[in-house]
Amino acid sequence: MIMGLLRRLVALMVFIACGYVLYHYGIGDVNSQAVVKGFRSPFLGYLPERLSSNALVAQAQPLAVAFPEQSEASAVLALRQNPSNGGAATHLMSLYEAQGRAAEADQVAELASKLWPAHTYTRSNLADYWLRRDRPDKQVQEWNVLLTRDRSFRKTLFPLLKKVVERDDLSPIILPFVQAPPVWWDSFFAYLSRDLEFSRLADLYRLRVAAPDGLSLSEQNNYVKRLIKERRWEEAHDTWFLALTPRQMRYGSGLLYDGGFESDVFNQAFGWRLSRSKNPRIKPDITYGIKGRKALQVILRKQDPINFRHISQRLMLSKGTYQLGLRYRTDTLKTTKGLSWRIRCVEGGKEVLGESTPLLGSNPWSSLSVNFTVPESCSVRMLRLVSTSRFRHDQFYQGSAWFDDIQINSVDFQEAVK
């Protein structure tokens, strides 16, 4: 009995809400004189309210050309019975549009966009309607609803939204989304970052930086990737670094970022890039004998051969001579040739600038250092832990290794300190 009473109360509340919407947004003004308790026509007979909303729409559609008044009456009655009926709203918009009744067509379109729930069918038709009415501002609003409700629309609508961004006269329409990004924004910005004309992308990025909510990590990473694609290395590094939190910035005081693996900044354009594979398994962790709170552990299981290239960091170094220094520990690392730290050019050449002695076997915490010289032609460098041998039969590993307190210092600076 209680459940029955609750159902009746819910039904009453829905009825009252629909009545309010009908009154507030003006369905009663859409040819209300034509739709009364019933509508008599020599062609349709009597339109009883007991017909379902969908049935009334089905009845209205074939009459649009020959009997537009009867078609309109049936569609309005359908909309009265079910304000969320997208078919009824769409039919009325088409009918009024064909008759040149633009104001009434706009009124129905505005109403349909405010009703809840307004389904994908309704929103798609509204977007098409506003396109025909040359109202891109309202069309983009409908796209926003479609993108928010259904990810599958991204493939179709992102290219169209990109065209809006590319036009000077339309780009201001995007500003509300820049100020308060919807759920699809990060994916859209990633889409734009791939091939939008760079100056426009840079303007959009600056607007996002100034927005109240600030940048997301996804936006930052995708913009930095584009800067790298454009070979704007210094700008890419500075953009990445300035987007870090104050705590994260503390680990970037040297020529290499976070040599103790203490931060949570991994797998970005700069900083450490660590493989997330199961073999090898790589993670910052706690162990004895480390300098800070954590060190980097590498665990390898003897399965298939591994061409190890799973730990790396880009280096922004000017011309000069440097020294790589680090602490390491190997725990029964069984392999024929071992692992080595290697510095090489990745922009302006591919030559190896320096390489450490191979690491294998069992060693307590030990130190190693490698001196290397950066030529002027080598604009970007990469520090990477690699398989010492390039032959597959030497690339079987079993055991683990730890790395801590990795630093790069200028040799000239070190000499000056001495």
Image (spheres, rainbow, N blue to C red):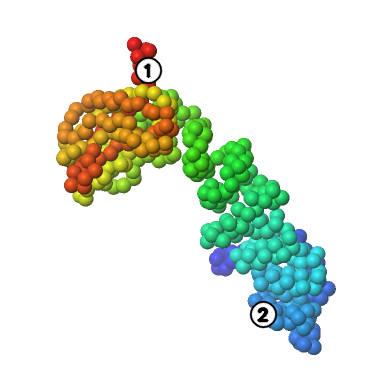
Q: Earlier in the sequence, mark 2 or mark 1?
A: 2
Callout 2 environment at 10 Å: few (<14), some (14 to 19), or many (20+)?
Answer: some
* Pointers 2 and 1 in contact (C-beta within 8 Å): no
Circle 1 sits on which residue? 412
Which secondary structure, mark 2? helix
- Residue 395 visible somewhere in the drawing: yes
Tell me which residue sits at (60%, 38%) in the image: 206
Q: Nearer the viewer, residue 72 or 35?
A: 72
* Residue 60, above or below 227: below
Q: Nearer the viewer, residue 356 or 374?
A: 374
Position in image of residue 193 (x %, y %): 53, 47
Tell me which residue sits at (76%, 70%) in the image: 97
Tell me which residue sits at (65%, 59%) in the image: 142
Position in image of residue 259 (x %, y %): 35, 29
The quarter holding residue 205 reads top right
* Residue 166, above or below 386: below
Which amino acid type is shown beneath numbered disc 1?
Asp
Left or right: 118 in relation to 400? right
Please identify, in this view, whether the residue under mark 2 or under mark 1 is nearer the observer.
1
Q: CA distance from mark 2 to mark 1?
A: 85 Å
* Residue 168, above or below 328: below
Q: How many numbered circles does the render carry?
A: 2
Position in image of residue 88 (x %, y %): 69, 72
Q: Nearer the viewer, residue 306 or 232?
A: 232
Callout 1 environment at 10 Å: few (<14), some (14 to 19), or many (20+)?
Answer: few
The quarter holding residue 338 reads top left
The quarter holding residue 283 reads top left
Q: Which mark is residue 58?
A: 2
